[in-house]
């Protein structure tokens, strides 16, 4: 094969791969539009109605956060809801925002520069408003600090439609603790019962909500591991069968040669 034939062959393979990838992307988008987008709209409609009622009746929702320097819990009030979407035509992100506020500022005295820095980092991780007054010695070394934690804590509950993985991601920021956590659901998960439980979870009435999702993922991992083990076992059996057949063939060949030598003798 000449150089041009070789390059032509490579080009054809590359074009075939590109066309295959384009078709895969088209299929993924089609699946999202037909299956996951309706679920996203359903979730948005639910959240929109939920916060309309919550903002009107001012539901009393208390939330505990480990906000003290020693990690002990402090009570906050959850309120001021707002929900937005990225697009009315093709929803790929729903963002529910609300705030957890204090009835009165929290005041703490913290000693030791390392403890002061650790507590400062904790407050920054929650993005909560606070004032800090430092006390330094004659050598300008930090020996203590007075913290006045004002609040509120901003909370985000984000739903992201993922075309590439055909799934919906739930991202929680400052919901139970500082920072973000991510959970992934498939179309089959988004049922009426799921949405109702999701609403209760937002209202702090269903703390077990995400544990069900974790258990489901564990089942999927176990199923995949069992399938992998069965596949490996099957491959081992096939290899053993091939070796056995090869040994039998070699043994038969040896016997055949022995018979030839006996006849010659």
Image (cartoon, rainbow, N blue to C red):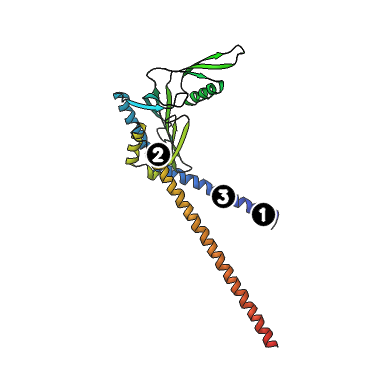
The residue drawn where x is 65% and y is 78% is 254
**Residue wearing tag 2:** 210
| Label 3: which secondary element | helix
The residue drawn where x is 58% and y is 49% is 15
Q: Residue 17 carries which label?
A: 3
Q: Residue 50 appears at what percent x and percent y?
A: 32, 30
Say whether residue 83 is visible.
Answer: yes
**Mark 3 or mark 1, whichever is nearer to me:** 3
Q: Residues within 10 Å of mark 1 (few under 14, many from 20)?
A: few
The residue drawn where x is 62% and y is 76% is 251
Alpha carbon of mark 2 to alpha carbon of mark 1: how far? 54 Å
Q: Split into 4 quadrants, where in the image is the C terminus? A: bottom right
Q: Residues within 10 Å of mark 2 (few under 14, many from 20)?
A: some
Q: Split into 4 quadrants, where in the image is the N terminus? A: bottom right
**Residue wearing tag 1:** 6
Say whether residue 45 is visible.
Answer: no
Q: In this view, does 265 lie above or below 183?
A: below
| Label 1: which secondary element | helix
| Label 2: which secondary element | helix
Q: Are marks 2 and 1 in contact (CB under 8 Å)?
A: no
């Amino acid at each position: 094969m000449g150089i041009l034939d070789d390059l032509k062959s490579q080009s054809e393979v590359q074009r075939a791969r590109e066309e295959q990838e384009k078709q895969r992307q088209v299929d993924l988008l089609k699946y999202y539009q037909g299956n996951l987008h309706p679920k996203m709209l359903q979730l948005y409609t639910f959240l929109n109605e939920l916060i309309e009622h919550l903002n009107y009746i001012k539901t009393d929702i208390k939330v505990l956060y480990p906000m003290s320097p020693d990690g002990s819990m402090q009570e906050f009030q959850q309120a001021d809801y707002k929900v937005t979407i990225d697009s009315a035509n093709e929803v790929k992100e729903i963002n529910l925002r609300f705030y957890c506020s204090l009835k009165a500022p929290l005041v703490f005295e913290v000693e030791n520069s390392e403890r002061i820095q650790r507590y400062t980092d904790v407050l920054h991780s929650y993005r909560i408003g606070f004032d800090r007054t430092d006390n330094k010695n004659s050598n300008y070394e930090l020996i203590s600090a007075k913290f006045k934690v004002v609040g509120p804590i901003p909370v985000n509950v984000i739903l992201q439609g993922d075309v590439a993985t055909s799934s919906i991601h739930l991202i929680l920021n400052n919901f139970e603790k500082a920072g973000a956590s991510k959970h992934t659901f498939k179309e089959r998960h988004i049922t009426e019962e799921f949405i109702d439980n999701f609403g209760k979870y937002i209202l702090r009435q269903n703390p077990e909500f995400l544990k069900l999702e974790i258990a489901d993922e564990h089942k999927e991992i176990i199923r995949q591991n069992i399938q992998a083990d069965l596949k490996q076992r099957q491959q081992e059996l096939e290899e053993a069968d091939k070796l056995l057949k090869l040994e039998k063939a070699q043994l038969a060949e040896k016997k055949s040669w022995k018979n030839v030598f006996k006849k010659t003798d």
